[in-house]
Image: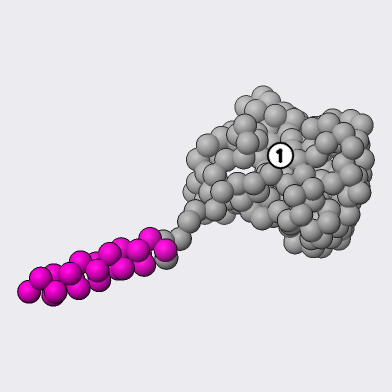
Amino acid sequence: MKFVKTKILLFSLLLVAGVLVFIPTAAHAATRTIADGGGNWNSTGTWVEGAVPTSADDVVATATSGNLTINAAATARSFDLTGYVRTVTHSIFISLSIGDATAGVGDNALIWPSSGWTYTGGTVSNISFVSTSATVQNVNFGGKAMAGLGQTITFNGVGGSWKLTGAINLTNTTSATVTLTNGTLDTNGQTVTATTFYSNNSNTRTLTLGASSINVSELRNALK
């Protein structure tokens, strides 16, 4: 009987150990810093840490970071270019998705300097905010002129919440769209310039315009 009890105890310990081994661990946010040499987003050599950003990672730059090309579908939890002085090139038909289930560092989703650096937006390039975190996250494009034909900025995270802390300036007057698909967007008195501004769907969403100026250039159906 003693032998049987010992076997049962040993089996129980092994079972518990097995469960502990196979319990999945939650992904933790990491920082991804644009290296001095810059490069393509999807290249490990572009990042100081030697790893391409995932949707759980916070992308940052320094005063010595090199030129960055968003050349393939890209993800990050947040994108902060404070102190950056070089050029970001957003390739045509490429989407940058920002957000996961948690808020970025300092509750920031995107922070761009208003001057001192260059942004080139490609045709039909897209920046999508997809966080599902209920924490209000700051979005500051710094009023940077984004002139790509068909360029879009989309807020589409179920339960997500964003507040503009700088102007959105989509300057292409032929086709450039801001869209709220899911979540909560507070334009917070900031100026939004685009060809069209859409939120015409049946999803659960909240749009607060407050004292914001919304400048749209489409002659018909500019606001939905």
The residue depicted at 79 percent of the width and 58 percent of the height is: 44
Name the one closer to the observer, 129 or 22: 22
Query: Compared with residue 175, is residue 166 higher up or lower down, i.e. above or below?
Result: above
Q: Can residue 29 be found in the magenta stretch?
A: no
Q: Using residue 36 as the reference point, say whether residue 98 is left or right of it.
A: left
Q: Give 89 or 210, whichever is nearer the viewer.
A: 89
Q: Is residue 12 magenta?
A: yes
On the image, the x and y values in percent for residue 209 come to: 63, 32
Q: Is residue 74 above or below residue 218?
A: below
* Residue carrying label 1: 110
Amino acid at dot 1: Leu
User: How far across and how far down the image is residue 8, in percent?
Assistant: 18, 71
State the image coordinates of residue 26 (x, y, percent, origin top left): 49, 53
Above-or-below relation of 222 to 189: below
Give the residue furthest to the front.
2
Give the residues in magenta: 1-21
